[in-house]
Amino acid sequence: MNNLKYISAIRNGDFTGLPIAGSSTAVNMTGNWKFFRPLLKPKKAPCFEACPLHIGISDYIKEFAAGNHLAALEILRLSNPMPAITGRVCPNFCQSACNRTDFDEALQIGNLERALGDFGLDHPHPGNDKDENKTAAIIGSGPAGLAAAIFLTRAGVKVTIFEQNTAPGGLLRYGIPAYRLPRPILDQEIDNIIESYKIELKCNHRIESAQLKKLTAEYDVLIAAPGLSRSSIPAQWPDIPKIKGALDLLAAISRNETIPGQNFVIIGGGNAALDTARSLKRLGKTVKIIYRRTRAEMPAYPDEIMEALEEGLQIQEEVVVAKVAGTGDALNLDLHHSRKDGKQITAGDFLETITCDFLIAATGQESGTDFKDYSPELLPAGDFAHGAASVAEALASGRKAAESALEKFGLLADYPVSNQTTEESAPITCTQLHLNYYVKKPAGKTPQLEAAARNKNFSEVNLSLTLDQLADEAERCFHCGSCTTCGICWFFCPDVAIAINHDSHEAESPILFDYDHCKGCGQCAEVCPRGVIEMEEDL
Amino acid sequence: MTKNHFTNDTNWQITNAEFMESGHMACPGCGASLSMRHVLKVLGPETIVVMPACCWAIIAGGQPTTALATPLLHTPFAVAAAAASGVRQALTAQKKENIQVLAWAGDGGTFDIGLQGISGAAERHEDMIYICYDNEAYMNTGIQQSSATPHGAWTTTTPGGKDFKYAKKDILAIIKAHDPGYLASATIAYPEDFYAKIEKAKAARGFRFIHLLAACPSGWKIDSQNSLEVTRLAVESGVFPLLELNDSGNIEKTYEPENPISVKDYLAAQGRFRKVSEKETELWQSEIDRNSSRNTS
């Protein structure tokens, strides 16, 4: 009888009193069970921390990978106004810090930056419409001077740059050879900057220290970024005409001047030594580098040393030039083994005497100016302020000088910065990431010109990859410490208590935790590849 | 659909539709509830779930609530396969062949109590998917040993660890002897492999059997956040290989760990194996090495 009653009740859609469950378990607030709750806590990426310019690398690569190249370029330029240049000449501090190194191979951030930079050559900077009625004079149009100019004009300051040479760029133009930084790229990048930001550039305009006072009176702020444009000649060999500074020679080569002599010996182990040697080799000269320590101790970038060796450059290690004697057109050099004397290196046993047409000193740089007594108004920037360093560091220094000026003007508040700069925490390490669900993928390396083809001309050694070719490389970024809405936490939640907010705006969280039902198991925190989810005691 | 960024196949789209509800009664970090969630994502709403006594009989919620958006038939312990056979016959009579019947049972209801019913259904090639979510003991009733409990494991009925004489029953070999329509072992810690196997089972016909390893934080004496990781270690160590019956009738591995870990590391990650001696660990390791040296069985 009962059975019949049930059947008719079901037919009538009346489930009351029947052993059939009709409502969802979602009415159970299982969130009450938990002792810990998951929270989204973004962290700083190591690349961001390592970069002197603190570029929002993860942010722009996110846009890059999504195919939004223009958006990526804008984020990149926010912190680095000349990516086509740094993408070629930066030693990539970011890449050395990349967490992916511990997994398979570092992300090729330099290549991504370079491709975006080249893309940007056809896309002028947005410039600036503000006018804050302030003026700035900048001495030197190298990376530091240009960076200072850009960051000042972005805030509405009118900038005039004084450049002693015929063209802007400083060491970018007169120090870095064309095979590392092709001149059309350099020209285009700087032209874009000068035009977009309406910077007044006065070339062939050398500023002497006597003029500083006048400039400080004329302009609201004066930034000095004259660089270290000359190689220092070792003090024991003054006034020998056959001994030349590496930077003078590089500048002469940049100006396409005829270089006399055939046999060159270069002393030094930095980038200037290698750049000079490789440039001379391309001009058909015979070149030898003499370095007092071992190759591993050379301060030059490892990539450059490797490329130089591929090109057949001779590097004689642990040797010093003890004596220089001139006989007519040639120089006689007495080579001795290096002897380590504490931190000092002195001449040890005699090795041999060699002959050369010119001895090139690449052992240090000095300022080409005589600025001595800084007026308190003068803000130093670039190599002139902190000693010889990378282009990225020069840019950062120029930006810092601009920021101090803006602070003085009270304009720093609405100054655009990369959105990661406010975080104080230490950058996230590889051990804080969860990489079980990552697949090893080879890095997108730049193809290089064959070594045999390089010595003939100044063609660029590192060839370009297109944006499309780098799409896979952009996908390799771990985005350490920042949520990409990859969905792995959502996938592995046993309580269906995580939702992904794909269209999240900045104010909203990209991950929504349903704390009414989350039991606090912590699996989401354990699988998050980027280490963004943390468990916090639920009180 | 959610595009996933955590597997080989970045074009793999996972449906956003959920057929398992929040608020279910599973313990935090339960591998069985996570497995059900994804099995139903694949099988979809046109599925009838048949469930004997097991953890899930509780997880599904007390009357009048249910955690599943699909019909769910609770049955006595021994008869999941028999009841599922009946449901299938009723659907066939109504010409509803498109509706999948999913028998969903724990290891107790599969390896021990339900075994004769499974054998009968498999013999008749009943058109159903039988999934055993194996948490390696009678967890729901208080962690009693089953024939799926691995040797050495602590349970409340084997307080010194299950005797090493009694190895875990080879359920795949038993079902294979019935010539099933599809046969595989899987775990949700390997999402692509898991989804591929459920998809294949869904597409096949006849009696289809999948053996899922599902971690139980309280029964395995692990922290709830490690449940997935320990399941992964089971596969990486070779204790629970991911297998599938291939077209030529052999069971073969569908996943080979790139850098296999030792059994010792798998055991050390769990409290239930604390009493396994070094000699027993070595014995276990040699069993695995022997098994993995032959690729198929």
Image (spheres, coloured by chain):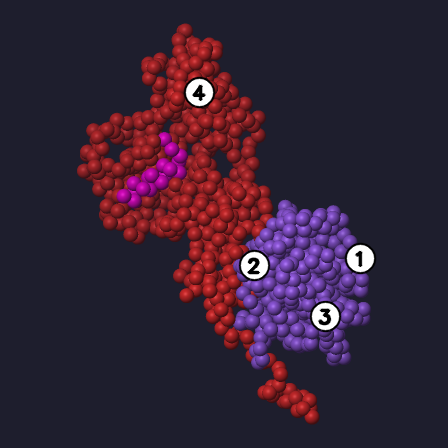
Chain colours: A red, B purple
Res. A54 image quadrant: top left
Q: Which residue is painted at 58% across and 80% down in the image?
A: B63
Mark closer to the observer (4, 2): 2
- Does residue B79 appear to the left or right of A264 in the view shown? right
Q: CA distance from mark 3 to mark 1?
A: 27 Å
Q: Which residue is mark 1?
A: B249
* Circle 3 Cα neighbour tier, 10 Å, few/some/many (<14 / 14–19 / ≥20): some
Q: Which residue is painted at 35% across and 19% down in the image?
A: A233
Q: Position of residue A153 (x, y in %)?
A: 31, 45
Residue furthest out toward the front: B160
Residue A292 tag number: 4
- Both labels 3 and 4 in a single chain: no
Q: Secondary structure at mark 3?
A: loop
Q: Position of residue B282 (x, y in %)?
A: 68, 48
Identify which amino acid the numbered label 4 is placed on. Answer: Arg
Q: Secondary structure at mark 4?
A: loop
Magenta stretch?
A388-404
**In front here: A191 or B130?**
B130
- Both labels 4 and 2 in a single chain: no
Q: CA distance from mark 3 to mark 4?
A: 82 Å
